[in-house]
Amino acid sequence: MSDRIVGRLPLSDIFLRSLRVGDRVQLTGRLLVARDAAHRRMIETLRGGGGLPFDIAGQTIYYMGPTPPPPGRAVGAAGPTTSGRMDAYIVDLLDAGLVATIGKGPRSPEVRKAMLERGAVYFVATGGAGALLSRAIVAARILAYADLGPEAVREIEVVDFPVIVANDTQGGDVFEEGRRRFETAPGDA
Amino acid sequence: MREIHTQSIADTVSRLVREACTYLTDDVRCALESALEREASELGRRVLRQLLQNACIAAEEGVPLCQDTGLAVLFIELGQDAHIVGGDLSAALNEGVRRGYVDGLLRRSCVVEPCHSRTNTGDNTPAIIHTRIVPGDQLRIVALPKGAGAENKSALAMLEPSKGWAGVVDFVVEVVSKGGAGACPPLVVGVGLGGNFEQVALLAKTALLRPLGSPAKDPRLGGLEDHIEQRCNALGIGPMGLGGTVTVLDVFVEEAPCHIASLPVAVNLQCHAQRHREARL
């Protein structure tokens, strides 16, 4: 478990393979932002044989829908949403070249297998730390699907955005490993 | 008869939803500080430090604590001797929600219908309103902006009475065990016990309104709360599910009489921010 690794976006294959579960990474560069409704639309487009209105190859998606920005700020509160809801969509996006995702909460066994086969990494950010994480976002613009409002696809620029490696390219899972380490028999508590 | 104007009701609701979404209450801050002292996991302590830091930043900068500013759940206690003037009460409550979310730059997270277009209503209305008529001439309003992360992992069971308290404890712990990691732990666990299908869910939600650190007055229920808390913290889920010794901050049980054939149990999970604010008019 390493402390404060610097991650430059877009993330290279070599960098992704160097990461291990529990590593604390500070990301700098550009992220795509998309959540439920945008995923539904992306997948309908891809499965209908169409192309996405932005390039997803080599990119990292942050599962997030911000509050509106106060004057002078790029975004309002901007913490992660539950990633499990995007499990139904991620495999198509991995096949389109997506290399990493950021959210909160565990992924399904099927998604973990799909990520492992493709060398993709899943990071978690702290859920509910929307004001703190907002400070690491220096610019934001709507990239597509503006009609979805808080669920539009955005491109954001982050500086030292703090995440933890939840699923690495070796098949590790921070939720399983963490729980196993701290679980006690009911009588011990 | 004492008059309460709908204008002041709308103003109050608008203020309450903004404050609830922006300022952590003192009981929650104390509970997170105490969790930081107890938590054995380094990653867990890092999460808790971030949450305390987040609360300071939100308060200083007037930015919401969390981007999921929820559906606006409003608990209304209307004194039977009060007279609402100036229009429709529920319209005034929704007007307060509309202004609070739109002018307060909170996220609008409500869709018109669940299964087809899922078009956003644009102003976070309608609010979910629970009204009780009570003695007196005052109006009490409690705003509980409820995000979906923890709400989605909540559950209800109609147990057989033979399952007893052991069955209740097992069900609550199972809900936390299965969904807790994705519900923004350390959690507050609201448990409804008894009543019927719809009442037990409301009991579980109402339980979340209790200040952290205040056990049930009935020692029987207080003991049940402690037992559930110990079992949940033994799961090892920890802050944000990354492993740790503090999975729940508190457990609150509310009960009601029920049918001779029933043992309803509802578990309403709440995230670590436990946002709520109240006012009396």
Image (spheres, rainbow, N blue to C red):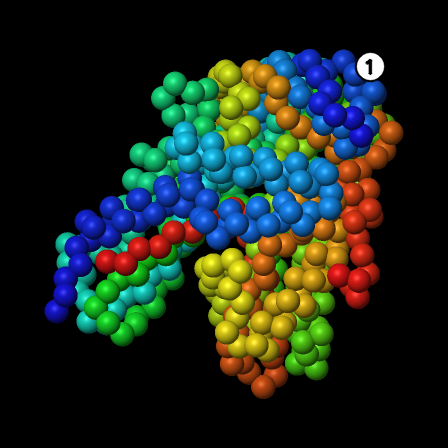
The quarter holding residue B84 reads: bottom left
Q: Is residue B61 above or below residue B206?
A: above
Find the residue positioned furthest to the front.
B37
Q: Quadrant of residue A124?
A: top right
In this image, A3 relative to B89: left or right?
right
Work out whether residue B226 or residue B17 is closer to the camera in this orientation and state it. B226
Q: Reply above or below: B137 against A88.
A: below
Element type at marker 1?
helix
What chain letter is assigned to the residue under label 1? A
Residue plotted at (49% across, 67% down): B203
Residue B98 screen position, x and y as percent: 32, 42
Residue extending furthest toward the bottom: B260
Q: Is residue B169 above or below residue B118?
A: below
Q: Nearer the viewer, residue B161 or B253?
A: B253
- For disc 1, the neighbor class at 10 Å (few under 14, some 14 to 19, many from 20) is few
The residue that label 1 is drawn on is: A14
Residue B26 visible in the picture: yes
Quadrant of the drawing holding the C terminus of chain B: bottom left
Q: Nearer the viewer, residue B213 or B91?
A: B213
x and y, in percent, of residue B153 in the image: 62, 52
Camera sees residue A35: no
Looking at the image, residue B263 sits to the left or right of residue B117; the answer is: right
Residue at position x 34%, y 47% in the image: B16
Identify the residue at horizontal 80%, vertical 56% (top origin). Answer: A184
Q: Position of residue A122 (x, y in %)?
A: 73, 30
Residue at 71%, 30% (x, y): give it. A164
- Up the image or down, B219 lies above or below B205; here it is below
Tell me the quadrant of the picture where the N terminus of chain B can be found. bottom left
Q: Amino acid at mark 1?
A: Ile
